Image (cartoon, helix red, strand yellow):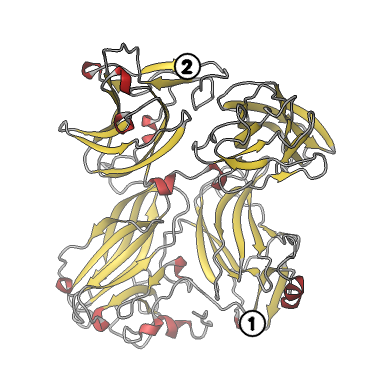
Amino acid sequence: MTRPSSSSRSSSRSSSSRSPQRAAAAPRCAPRSAERGRAVTRLCAPSELLQRPNTCESSTGRFVAVESAMSDDHEDQMGADAGPQRETTGVLLSPVLEHSEWSCLRLVYQITRSGSLEILQRVEGKSFDKPLWSSQEPSDSWIISSMDLQNNTEPYRVVFEGKPGQSAGSSVAIFEIHISPGYCLECDFEESHLCGYNNQWNANVNWYVGGGGGVYNNMPNDHTYNNKTGHLMYVDSVYAKTFKEVAKLVSPMTTVPMSGCLSFQYQRSEERGNLFSVYTRDRLGQYQELWRAGQDTQGDWSGTLGEWIPVQVDLKAPYSIEVVFEVSFNSPRGGRVAVDDISFSPEFCSTDTEPTFDPSIANCDFESGLCRYTQDTLTGSSWRRVSVKPNIFRNGDHTTGAGSFLLAHSRLSPRSGYVSHLIGPTLPGNMKYCLRFYFSLRGFNQTERALVVYLQHQNGSQEKIWTQGEKSRGIWIATDVTFQISQPAKVVFVSTCRSFWDCGSVALDDITVSLGDCELTAGSLSTSLPGHCDFEAGLCGYTQDKQSDVADWERRRGPTPTSYTGPRGDHTTGIGYYLHMEASPLLPGQSVRLLSRPLRGSWGPQCLRFYYHMYGSGTGQLSVHLDKDGGDALLWQRSGEQSIAWLRATVEYQCDSQHQARVVFEATRGSSVRSDIAIDDIILESGPCP
């Protein structure tokens, strides 16, 4: 949808219900070409421009862009056998911002052909920027995106990082940057960008922009200004052709957890001919109803104008959601519905509303006991809390490799079996949860009853939500279980053994519970912060040292090729990826080095945590260095065989300069091929280690 000029804005926004082509379109503002762009008063010139992108302008406006260095002719000449090309990156820095209150950043951008755009928050003294939003979706027109900026006590900058793809004609462009106080959900529909709200297109019924002093006088006054020149959103049944025609007005996707009171104003005519509801919709497309209009007594707008009706509804969004205003009609005489002045407050609408439940009360790593878990010893034997010191025969716990975990096999005699129950704390109803835990089975012949997870309801009934179907090969396996309950319930872990000859051991560790579907909440480390990497999707910005070593770290899943050395699975999930040094092609004393991305110089303590695996009779050495100013400072080192388990390393170090540095992981081959060394789940953070 082309951005209207100032002179045409009123007429285009006061579109009649008889002009469906003028419905509120998806959040797009202007075409890509500069000739059709339009200068706007909210165009923010960045205070700094690194690796300066092109600034394109014309008689009608300007935008900034970073473009692929390859032309179509050059691409044809390179051919299919060309090697990798140098990546082009454009970086914009905002002025220093001091926002003690919640703000909303709106961005008008376009990715042409291929590329990526990432928005980050940079705080002085932090080694890494905090990701706020990113996109890799190309489009043929300008797109509006919104992201919430939480209140921050420290000054910060917003970083805009664009990377065009390597194909010819690829580019990333920014047309408008707009930061305003308040939440991105809020809107009075007075601005042409409609705060990023968009109409989900329907062939017959759609949401339109009303008001603006147009010629259609049967429009009600808007709520913001209470006159004909203000703007509102409305939907009309006049073009409804089939039963239950549906129109959807969709908010921007929230980008941070939030809870509070959602407020809006609405008018509705012919209440028997339409159904007006408000839902939340998550990234998986799952809906949850927040509110539904009742049988209001209002006349048709063509007669006496109805009054605006205020609505307040509690909103709890621990993960990203859209708010959907949905109207359905059953005939062309279903009337109209209007909405205006959507707002949000971090305080709940009612003082009786319970605060958002903190599911972390059900988390436990068993390092200091059973946390809030209990055992039902009346129905059988109990789970035992055990710990295993690092050794080369028996796996340790998942948390540190040397800590505590639960074991269900107890002390069996050949004539006995057991049933072990571990009961979690009560979880409130009317919510969806994600349960994650790690388990390890050994020696079970009948695994379907080795470990089962139930929901124990208040009436005493049990509902099975997960069962183990195959052996885990003696390694820690991560399991995610999504479940929804209408009434309070408890999670129960049950291990059953009918006789000594059918059973082995069942181990359990690192139970966590979060709100929402596991597909939304159980993300990997590599998608969170730049200093985190679990190697599930690649190297996360880490690079191989091509100058100081003779080989590379290898990304692998499952066991390493050489027997009696290396891990049998990764630490993150047991079935994912890790990095390892394959000793077979190396000579004793040769090494491989992995470099972190440059750490922005910052004063004060810094924390590095990672997991390492050093198992094998000929294991050499693993060391961690800080490479700065051309010299290496040793931070941590281990030599020789350590354990058959993944072990956690915690390294706190002090930065004494503002110069950039890199963290280096160096593995050195030992005396024999049984010298594989592996690393996984790296976390680099500013501040002291917890």
Q: Name the residue nearer the viewer: 279 or 101.
A: 279
The residue furthest bottom is 215
Vertical relation: 101 (above or below) 451 = below
The mark found on residue 7 in the picture is none
Query: Residue at position x 68%, y 62% from top?
Result: 46
The mark found on residue 60 in the picture is 1
Q: Secondary structure at mark 1?
A: loop
Question: Percent position (x, y) of residue 420?
Answer: 29, 21
**Quadrant housing the C terminus:** top right
**Circle 1: is it few (<14), some (14-19), or many (20+) Cα within 10 Å?**
few
Residue type, mark 1 in image: Thr
Task: Give the tally of numbered discs.
Answer: 2
Vertical relation: 322 (above or below) 646 = below
In three-dimensional space, the C-alpha distance between marks 2 and 1, rounded to whole angstroms, equals 70 Å
Question: Percent position (x, y) of residue 385?
Answer: 40, 17
**Circle 2: is it few (<14), some (14-19), or many (20+) Cα within 10 Å?**
some
Residue type, mark 2 in image: Ser
Query: Residue at position x 26%, y 63% from top?
Result: 277
Residue 600 can be seen, yes or no:
yes
Look at discs 2 and 1 and give the one toward the viewer. 2
Q: Which residue is mark 2?
A: 387
Question: Percent position (x, y) of residue 519?
Answer: 41, 48
Query: Residue at position x 71%, y 71% from top?
Result: 55
Rendered image quadrant of residue 592: top right
